């Protein structure tokens, strides 16, 4: 087993496509498939159940993905720190990484930034929304996406708004409800609601669910990939930020009543004057602009 195989597997899961992963990794799809077969043979278990147009990740695959992602992130951190301790310091920008559902924004912004500033290493620090202000204040991270309600009146942070977005009912086009133009929350009482694990959501979203949908049956997913898979299998409907589904032909959106909206932006410590942060700000803002969110959902989520 090699690190390259771990990178291949992580890319496939994150892209939800062998072809997109192959393009990202600059290898052919057959070569990528062969590497996954080799991994499964070595591990003695199935990681991905393939069909003609898609695949389903198994429980073993989920375990292997989480472990592989942790190993690769830790390796990046170790390399950066070793260079520093060895007398060849590399400039580093540490970005707070909310794995779901903000990873699409962070991956795009990081890729564009590193292309223009290859001498600056990007380190992703996994965290949840409620941890971000504390991590910024103690300089564990340099900058992060965050929703406005978590910043509040914290005068130690600089908050730069990027876009406003709404949450809507997201329904598979094959679901009987997809023929309707309006639905009330009471219409969903007998329909499972597919949600991300609450730790991945904002407090605003979790409070809405508790207030208006507390008695509804819920199914929980630990990633957007798993959530979309559950929807495709018609296990239920979901409530999603508008930028995550607007260009998906397999999902119909119906406005929520009562409405739910939020504001997304970036934050960093006011007293943290690193040049890296100043350089990164426009890339993070651009990736999360309303227009760019549509482009990203088209390229990465279909």
Image (cartoon, helix red, strand yellow):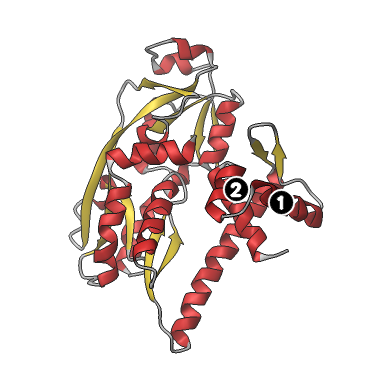
Asked if residue 84 is positioned above or below residue 9 in the image, the reply reads below
In-image side of 40 versus 217 (left or right): right
Residue at (67% x, 59% y) in the render: 5
> Taking the image as drawn, is residue 210 in sight?
no
- x, y (%) of residue 227? 54, 35
Give the mark, 2 or 1, whose residue is nearer the N terminus: 2
Q: Quadrant of residue 38?
A: bottom right
Q: Which mark is residue 36?
A: 1
Q: Secondary structure at mark 1?
A: helix
Helix, strand or loop at disc 2?
helix
Q: Nearer the viewer, residue 12 or 209?
A: 12
Would you place residue 212 above or below residue 80 in this image? above
Circle 1 residues within 10 Å: few <14, some 14–19, many ≥20: many
Residue 233: image quadrant is top right
Q: Are marks 2 and 1 in contact (CB under 8 Å)?
A: yes
199 to 123, vertically: above or below: above
Q: In screen coordinates, is 12 left or right of 81?
A: right
Residue 54, by quadrant, is top right
Image quarter in which the N terminus is found: bottom right
On the image, the x and y values in percent for residue 137 come to 29, 66
Residue 50: x and y in percent read 70, 37
x and y, in percent, of residue 58 in the image: 69, 42
Q: Residue at x 41, y 35 (%)?
A: 244
> Which residue occupies 37% across, 29% down?
211
Query: For the point 33% across and 70% down, which residue is it?
Result: 139
Query: Is 262 situated left or right of 20 in this image?
Result: left
Real-space Cα separation, disc 2 to disc 1, in angstroms: 10 Å
How many numbered marks appear?
2
Give the residue number, with chain letter if any, for mark 2: 12
Residue that sits furthest to the bottom in the current view: 87
**Image disc number at residue 170:** none
The one of 168 and 110 positioned closer to us in this rendering: 110
């Amino acid at each position: 087993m090699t690190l390259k195989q771990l990178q291949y597997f992580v890319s496939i899961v994150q892209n939800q496509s062998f072809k997109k992963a192959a393009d990202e990794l600059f290898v052919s799809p057959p070569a990528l498939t062969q590497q996954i077969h080799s991994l499964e043979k070595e591990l003695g278990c199935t990681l991905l159940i393939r069909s003609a147009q898609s695949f389903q990740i198994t429980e073993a695959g989920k375990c292997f993905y989480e472990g592989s992602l942790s190993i690769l992130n830790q390796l990046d951190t170790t390399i950066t720190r070793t260079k520093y301790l060895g007398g060849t310091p590399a400039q580093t920008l540490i970005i707070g990484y909310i794995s779901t559902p903000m990873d699409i924004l962070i991956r795009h912004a990081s890729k564009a930034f590193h292309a223009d500033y290859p001498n600056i290493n990007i380190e992703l620090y996994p965290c949840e929304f409620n941890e971000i202000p504390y991590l910024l204040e103690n300089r564990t991270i340099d900058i992060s996406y965050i929703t406005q309600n978590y910043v509040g009146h914290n005068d130690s942070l600089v908050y730069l708004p990027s876009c406003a977005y709404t949450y809507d009912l997201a329904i598979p086009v094959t679901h009987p409800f997809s023929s309707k133009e309006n639905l009330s929350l009471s219409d969903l009482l007998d329909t499972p609601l597919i949600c991300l694990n609450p730790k991945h959501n904002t407090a605003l979203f979790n409070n809405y669910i508790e207030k208006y949908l507390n008695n509804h049956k819920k199914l929980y997913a630990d990633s957007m990939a798993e959530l979309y898979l559950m929807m495709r299998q018609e296990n239920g409907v979901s409530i999603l930020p508008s930028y995550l589904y607007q260009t998906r032909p397999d999902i119909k959106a119906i406005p929520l009543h009562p409405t739910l909206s939020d504001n997304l932006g970036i934050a960093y410590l006011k007293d943290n004057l690193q040049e890296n942060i100043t350089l990164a700000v426009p890339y993070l803002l651009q990736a999360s602009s309303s227009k760019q969110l549509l482009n990203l959902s088209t390229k990465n989520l279909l």
